[in-house]
Amino acid sequence: MTDRNTIIGLLLIFAVFIGFSYLMTPSKEESAALKRKSDSIVMVRQAQREAEIKAIAREQVMSLEKRKAEAMASGEVLDSTKIEKLALKDQLGKFSNSGYGKDHFVVLESDLVKMRIASKGGRIDRIELKKFKTWDGRPLVLMNSDSLHFNFSFFSANRLVSTENLFFQPVFYGNTPRGDTLVKITGNDSIVFGMRAYADASDTTISPDKYIELVYTLRGDDYMIGYRINFKGMTDVIDPSTKYLLLDWKENLLRQEKSAKMERMVSTIYYHYVGDEVDNLTETKDEEVNLKNEKVKWIGFKQQFFTTTLIAGDYFDAPRMATQTLPFKGNYLKTMTTELGIPFNPTQTRSINMSLYAGPNKFYTLKSYKLHLERQIPLGWSFRPMAWINIWAVIPVFTFFGNLGWNYGIIILILTIMLKIVLFPIAYKTYKSSAKMRVLKPDIDEINKKYPKPDEAMKKQQATMDLYKRAGVNPMAGCVPMLLQMPILIALFRFFPASIELRQQPFLWAADLSSYDSIWTFPNGFSLPFYGDHVSLFCLLMTISSIIYTKVNENMMGTSSQQMPGMKFMMYLMPAMFLFWFNDYSSGLSYYYLLANIFTFAQVFLIRATIDENKLHAQIEANKKKGVKKSGFQKRLEEMAKQQKYQGKRR
């Protein structure tokens, strides 16, 4: 009976481990509910909009061809410049002169960010985070012109105008220092810089009261970039029936970390419903969602340790988002795509306020903006106790000792000691329960000998339960404390690979505690299935310590392979699987589990030294002699046994 309960306990622990992992991934039904299926009216409107865009594009091509034919018939000579200007006039209408120019760049630089603005499109062309480097020591670039498409579209004079086709002119505000190509600030200073595309301009003059302007505000000590679109004199330029601007944002995420496999696995798009929860596209597979009748506050292209998040002043309408995993060859991870509407009224709207966060996934930094941006860090939000453990225990410890400049290998050691102290009462109760079961083992063996036949299983179970009741022993008392520890184990499993505090932090032989520690790489690109192309020493040591712990626990429970060959296999299967699961994971996580096992050994020997098993046996024997009131469960077992005996006699 002891063996059976132990097996049940291990099965429960394994089931809870799998269950928590499953809870982190929403079901198809839950995902479908979160995505808010749109109604047919919106779908029809979207189809009409796309049809209009295609029709206008065809009309523009036909108009240009007609103009060329008229020029040829009249003998007019059209050189390449005239043809280009004719094309721009048909394509851009009142913005045709803004469609002709030469691309140049202005760099805005603060203490944290170096941002390059391109005159063509007036858009951010490149963002570099100055305080960070890639895994191989290169500048850490979040956005790059080679991998970025960021464009606004609107209707003007029956034409679809895209800002990516316009050339913008630089404008400096206030006391912002002027610079032809570079403007630098520091501390509490800020840069306010604009890019204007003029309407109704000619080759020699512009209309100063007719323009679209993209304004950027960069502060010396902030990763949040102010972003505003100004409109002046656009009432008779932009189609008066316009309800929103269309933003098309597409980006190939650049690889930043040592393990491209892990970085791909955790990179995805996050978004925040207005007045509701934060959601995200599936991380481990490609996905596309269309929230046609929904409003979101922000959308973030999130990587393992960094994010680029566009935040609406009001809201974004009906976003369509998709992720696509790119081949392992090359320097890119995934393609992130979003298309959304920005509310707009040509007769009323003068400015559209937004902001762009381009920086690290640091919990307190993201939380300080009070926009739920910290929900992009996977702390176990799907099961709140896990998130609470990380928020109220793990992150404060990391932050406090990290600010003191301590090595994070030592900080993980301190965290392990603190958690073991907190969990010591549970560990003590677990060991004491196992000691009681070990003392009762001879009695259990006697019961097994007394009822060896399969048809006497009910009697054996009843006798075993009676023994437990008289001895004052709960066979599941050792399993429940172990189950209570599972949220902590899984919370740390989620936290360590996402902790930017561990990024590029060395300890012993590990160069980066946020990634795997490789002591040997297989030659010639060889890779073992489910294992990888390298050997992680922390993972190997953690696996060995887990096997040793399993052996110690087996001896402590007094089990043997002859009695329980199936259970023995199960007990050693989990540690063996760790070797494959954690070889590509954070070496800091494997190091923590290794320390946890070492301290568990120490706790076992300490507790064992304080528990007198002879005294415990005497106490159990005394409990046996006491009269014990039968529980309802025990009464039902006896009744079932009587019925089984009666039916056996009838046969």
Image (cartoon, grey):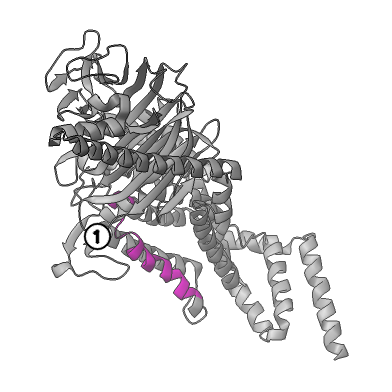
Residue 131 in sight in this render: no
**Relative height, residue 68 to residue 335 (above, below):** above
Taking the image as shown, residue 63 lies to the left or right of residue 103, namely right
**Span shown in magenta:** 567-589
Rendered location of residue 129, percent (x, y): 22, 33
Residue 184 in sight in this render: yes
Q: Residues within 10 Å of mark 1 (few under 14, many from 20)?
A: many
User: Total number of numbered labels?
Assistant: 1
Q: Furthest residue to the top? A: 175
Q: Nearer the viewer, residue 225 or 608?
A: 225
Magenta stretch: dominant secondary structure: helix
Q: Mark 1 = which residue?
A: 536
Rendered location of residue 603, percent (x, y): 41, 52
Rendered location of residue 246, percent (x, y): 41, 34
The residue drawn where x is 56% and y is 41% is: 42
Taking the image as shown, residue 533 lies to the left or right of residue 39, namely left
Mark 1 is on which residue type? Ser
The residue drawn where x is 68% and y is 71% is: 464
570 in the magenta segment: yes
Quadrant containing the N terminus in the rendered view: bottom right
Taking the image as shown, residue 133 lies to the left or right of residue 342, namely left
Taking the image as shown, residue 99 lies to the left or right of residue 499, namely left
Residue 261: quarter of image? bottom left
The residue drawn where x is 23% and y is 63% is: 535
**Relative height, residue 340 to residue 325 (above, below):** above
